[in-house]
Structure formats: C-alpha cells, structure tokens
C-alpha cells in the first residue's frame, strides 16, 4: 500500500487493517470522510502518532499481539468494533478501547475528545457503559442502510439481544432513501429483517423499483412467502437455526418448532432459492440424538426436493461475554466434528441424485480455542507465540491448555463459573445487568435437567 501520507490531512493518524482483503465498510467510510489513511504494513505503524484498529473477531487479538513490537513510544493505539465490546484480549496494548457505536463519536475522538460514553481508558480500567447511539448508520457504501439495532428475541447464546435494547429506524427515513436510490442492489441491515415492523412495506417499495435486498437474515418463525419471493435466486438465504433439534432450540430460548423449520426450508426451495442454514454445536445439553435429528431433517429435504442447493454452516459454540452463557463450561466435541466431516464426505456429489447438500467445514478446535480464551485473558505476544497459526490435527482442549500454560493460566476458562465469578469484562456495563443474565442462565440449566428426565 502506498505510503504517500502527505496527501492526507492527518499524516500521523491512520487505520491499521488487520486482515487480508478489503477493509470493513465503516473503516473505508471514515477514511474517506475524515482523511485518515488505511495502512496494512506493520512498518508504517512506527511513524504514526495515533492508530485506530477495527476489531471484528476475537481472533484479531492474535494479530494485534504480533504488532506489539511496532508500537513506538508516545503513540496512542485506539480500538473499536463489534468484537471490542469485551476488551479483555487487547487492552494490555491499547491505550483506549471504544465500546459500542462510534458513528457519531468517531469525529470527536479524532479531534482529541476522550471523555465520552463508551471510552475505556486502558491504564485506568474505568467503568464504562456501552455506547448505544440513537442514530442509524447509512450509506457507508452504495446501498447500505441500517433498519434496526439489537434483536427482539432473547436467545441465550447471542450477544445482540443482551448488550443493547432493540431499536428500529424510522420508516419514512428508509422509504425516502429507497425512493431516491437508483441502483439495483441494497443492503438493509438488521439482525432479522422479517422482525422489522415495516419490512413488508419495504418489500413492496423494492418490488416496484426492481431493487433486491441482499441482507437476508431471517428469524424463520415469521418468514412469509412474499419475503422469500423478494430475494434474489442467486444469493443464499441464511436461516439461523442454531440448535440441531427442537429440544435443543427450546433450551437455548430459540424455540423454533421442527415443523416450522422444515416448512421454511421447504418453501425457500420450492421458490427456487438457495438456502444456507446455520447451526451451532458444542451447545449446553447437546447429545448425539440432537445431531441425529439434523440428519433426519436433511434426509426429509432430500426426499422432498430433487433439485436445489442447500448449504449447512456449522459454528462451534463459544461462551460469549455479556450473555447468559458466560457462566457455562465451554467444550469442543471432537466426535461431533467427525460426524460433520463424515456428513460432508457423504454429501459430495449429492446434486447428481437430487437436492445438492453442502456441509461447510467448521472452525477447527485450535481456532475455537483461540476465540474462547480471547474472551478471558490478554492475548500477549507470549500467548500468541505459544499457539500455532494453524493445526492439521484435531487436538483436545487439554492439549492447547498445556501449550499456553507457560504464558497464561486458562484452565479455569473451561470450567463452569459460580454466580459471583469476577469476569474480566465486569467493568463494561451493557443493557442487561449481570444478575439478570445469571437468572436466564439458571433457567437454561433447569430446561436441560427437565429435558433429560
């Protein structure tokens, strides 16, 4: 990347892009509107006074750790982004971490204002409240517009429902944007677009103008035929199912009946849409019977449909901060991984005999382990060095605990926590307080006990 920083108004300030490919849209937006260059060469950090990082995955903390040697004395490093809500992994190297929405706040930070709601001073580790801005993001890039924040539903595993209250944009504002939009494809952002109260009206507006909405996150329970038909046939419709079985989904507070799930998938395939269902594994209360239920669902769809595309994404579950799950005992079930891989082998070429089923290989035990410890401990260069970048073998959690033991104790991370456990993120206050989260955790445990009797 070019180093012609003299072209920018703020030559000693930059965004550092941690990953390959294009930077996040919001980073590109602020780079353009605020004249802040984006760099990706670690050497460039040594000439910077202020460096901004956008943290979008807890695994980004391992990349930050490798950059530590490039931080020059007197420079200020500031992090934000979706995965920075829990700053535990990065606050050892950052000077500040901004927690929450920064669309309005960013310009203030850029001009030297740090006494803001959402701003954590890492040297003081002050109590900080999640910054939930009232405005809605719009036009980061062509076609991007935010419909809602948070989530109406209270799934026990998902932070979206717990860290902020659910808010919807103003219908007239979105309508005005669509009325003036002269493109063909928009990205109307929402956790579940069919949960947005005025989305049916938007469907009609987009249908009249020939606009396609690429943001097709849906809640299944309220999925209508009209909603399905409004989507592009060339784009996979992601359906967040999460639990393998109806029993498991009820435990997780995502009570999707199996009949409703099969009906939603059935209708999507009937209308010629490509499907991508998303499942988690390693969930509390999960058994072999739950995975058997998924296999039965797949076979049912294979019998019903002789053509079409059905992708299945598998995500190893994390005990995420700011959710009722933060007290649980995390684990990675290698047997379930084997069954997923076996399913993938069995479904190769399935399109030749009917419905094409594509199981997506999940994150490895190593990748999952990195994400899980990033919730609880600082990811220093010593921790990052102790773990390989990749691992072809399916090693156990105990193996990786031993690998990092010389750098940091993480054994407790993989045990259940008691009610009064001091989490390293307890100084960050979100919409739902800790006592309320724990009450829901106990509710989940009771559901597991009842389901086993």
Image: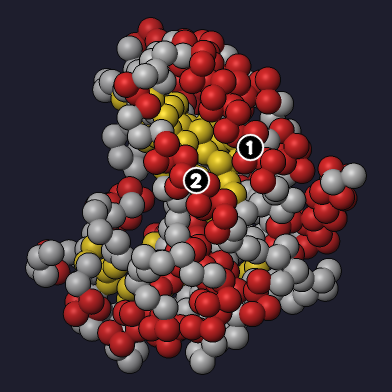
Within the image, what quadrant is residue 234 found in?
top left
Residues at marks 1 and 2, CA–CA distance in whole angstroms? 11 Å
Q: Which mark is residue 340?
A: 2
Left/right placement of residue 359 relative to residue 437 reads: left
Residue 369 percent across, percent down from the top left? 52, 68
Residue at the spot x=33%, y=12% of the render?
210
Residue at the spot x=43%, y=88% of the render?
382
Instruction: Give SS at disc 1.
Output: helix
Q: Which mark is residue 255?
A: none
Q: Earlier in the sequence, mark 1 or mark 2?
A: 1
What residue did someone put label 1 on?
292
Looking at the rendered image, the quarter that the C terminus falls into is top right
Left/right placement of residue 236 relative to residue 185 reads: right
Crowd rating for badge 1 (residues with CA inside 10 Å; few <14, some 14–19, many 20+): some
Left/right placement of residue 209 relative to residue 1 reads: right
Note whether 220 is above or below 165 in the view shown: above
Residue at the spot x=44%, y=10% of the render?
271
- Labels in figure, total: 2
Residue 42 percent across, percent down from the top left? 23, 76
Q: Residue furthest top?
A: 208
Instruction: Give SS at disc 2.
Output: helix
Q: Does residue 53 show up? A: no
> Is disc 1 in contact with disc 2, using a CB cutoff of under 8 Å?
no
Residue at the spot x=24%, y=54% of the render?
21
Within the image, what quadrant is residue 66 found in?
bottom left
Q: Does residue 185 show up? A: yes
The one of 195 and 63 positioned closer to us in this rendering: 63
């Amino acid at each position: 990347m070019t180093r012609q920083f003299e072209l920018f108004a703020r030559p000693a300030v930059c965004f550092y892009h941690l990953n390959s490919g294009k930077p996040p849209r919001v980073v590109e937006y602020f780079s353009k509107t605020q004249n802040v260059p984006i760099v990706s060469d670690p050497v460039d950090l040594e000439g910077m006074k202020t460096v901004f990082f956008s943290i979008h995955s807890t695994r980004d903390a391992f990349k930050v750790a490798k950059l530590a040697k490039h931080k020059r004395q007197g420079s200020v490093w500031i992090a934000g982004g979706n995965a920075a809500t829990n700053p535990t992994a990065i606050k050892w190297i950052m000077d500040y971490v901004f927690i929450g929405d920064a669309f309005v706040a960013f310009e203030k930070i850029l001009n030297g204002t740090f006494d803001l709601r959402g701003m954590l001073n890492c040297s003081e580790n002050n109590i900080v409240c999640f910054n939930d801005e009232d405005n809605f993001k719009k036009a980061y890039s062509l076609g991007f517009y935010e419909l809602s924040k948070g989530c109406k539903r209270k799934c026990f595993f998902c932070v979206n429902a717990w860290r902020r209250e659910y808010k919807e944009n103003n219908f007239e504002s979105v309508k005005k944007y669509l009325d003036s939009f002269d493109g063909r494809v928009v990205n109307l952002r929402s956790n579940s677009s069919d949960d947005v109260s005025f989305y049916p009206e938007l469907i009609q507006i987009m249908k009249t103008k020939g606009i396609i909405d690429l943001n097709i996150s849906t809640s299944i329970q309220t999925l209508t035929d009209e909603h399905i038909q409004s989507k592009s046939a060339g784009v996979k419709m992601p359906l967040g199912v999460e639990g393998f079985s109806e029993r498991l989904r009820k435990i997780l507070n995502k009570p999707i009946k199996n009949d409703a799930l099969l009906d939603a998938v059935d209708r999507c395939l009937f209308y010629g849409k490509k499907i991508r269902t998303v499942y988690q594994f390693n969930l509390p209360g999960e058994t072999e019977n739950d995975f058997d239920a998924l296999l039965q669902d797949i076979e049912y769809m294979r019998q019903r449909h002789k053509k079409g595309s059905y992708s299945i994404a598998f995500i190893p579950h994390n005990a995420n901060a700011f959710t009722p799950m933060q007290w649980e005992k995390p684990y990675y079930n290698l047997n379930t991984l084997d069954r997923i891989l076996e399913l993938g082998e069995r479904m190769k070429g399935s399109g030749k005999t009917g419905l094409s089923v594509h199981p997506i290989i999940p994150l490895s035990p190593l990748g999952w382990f990195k994400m899980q410890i990033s919730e609880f401990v600082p990811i220093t260069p010593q921790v990052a060095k102790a773990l390989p970048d990749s691992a072809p073998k399916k090693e156990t959690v105990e193996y990786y605990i031993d690998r990092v033991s010389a750098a940091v104790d993480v054994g407790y991370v993989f045990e259940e926590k008691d009610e009064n456990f001091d989490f390293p993120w307890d100084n960050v206050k979100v919409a739902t307080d800790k006592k309320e989260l724990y009450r829901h955790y106990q509710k989940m445990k009771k559901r597991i006990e009842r389901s086993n009797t």
